[in-house]
Amino acid sequence: MLTLILGGARSGKSALAERLANDSGHDVVYIATAQARDGEMAARIAHHRARRPSSWSLVEEPLALAAALREHARDGRLLLVDCLTLWLSNLLGDAAPRFDIERAALFDALSDLPGDIVFVSNEVGLGITPMGELTRRFVDEAGRLHQALAQRCDRAIFVAAGLPLLLKGTLP
């Protein structure tokens, strides 16, 4: 089962993903894409870390997401990826232009991975068109990524104010 959970910042999307993972009854591996490049991000990471059950495994992978999924996917295991927009930001800011390669590797990997995967991502395309070129590219690439991933997922959920809105599939 592939699930995509979208929402704005502090919408409750990560909490929903964590609840789905916890309720799955599967072994859970949390794949974190964030990098603590400043104090505010370090505090966000600490907040997420404190919420997670100690029984969950943690993999920190800011760039090579497809490789991490291939390495850790198993029957009876749920991979929780939080979050795709941080992964996208890491790739767009990486010195080597690897976004196209990593995106293609992600979609290729999804076709045959065992177990369940829950992807968390920020919906950033609901506001006005950004002024800067890099910001516009980020919003455009995030929108394309979400559309392509939603097509491949069994379930897609949008979260606002902590409330899930089912876009595709069924809620457990």
Image (spheres, rainbow, N blue to C red):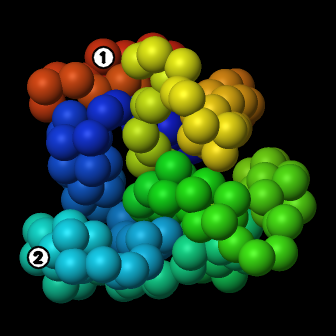
Residue at point 18% right, 84% down? 54
- Say above or below: 152 vs 31: above
Residue at point 53% right, 27% down? 130
Residue 44 on image: x %, y %: 20, 67
**Residue 24 makes an appearance in the image:** yes
Element at label 2: helix
Image-based side of 30 in relation to 73, left or right: left
Circle 1: residue type: Leu
| Residue sitting nearer the eye, 107 or 130 | 130
Tally of numbered discs: 2
Residue 29 on image: x %, y %: 42, 74
On-image quarter of the N terminus: top right
- Say above or below: 84 vs 149: below
Q: Quadrant of residue 7?
A: top left
For label 1, the residue is: 165
The Cα–Cα distance between marks 2 and 1, rounded to whole angstroms, is 26 Å
Image-based side of 57 in relation to 110, left or right: left
Element at label 1: strand
Residue at point 53% right, 52% down? 84
**Residue 112 makes an appearance in the image:** no
Residue 85 on image: x %, y %: 51, 50
Residue 99 on image: x %, y %: 79, 58
Circle 2: residue type: Ala
Find out whether the residues at labels 2 and 1 contact each other: C-beta distance under 8 Å: no
Mark positioned earlier in the residue sequence (2 or 1) = 2
Q: Quadrant of residue 6?
A: top left
Q: Neighbour class for label 2 at 10 Å: few (<14), some, many (≥20)?
A: few
For label 2, the residue is: 50
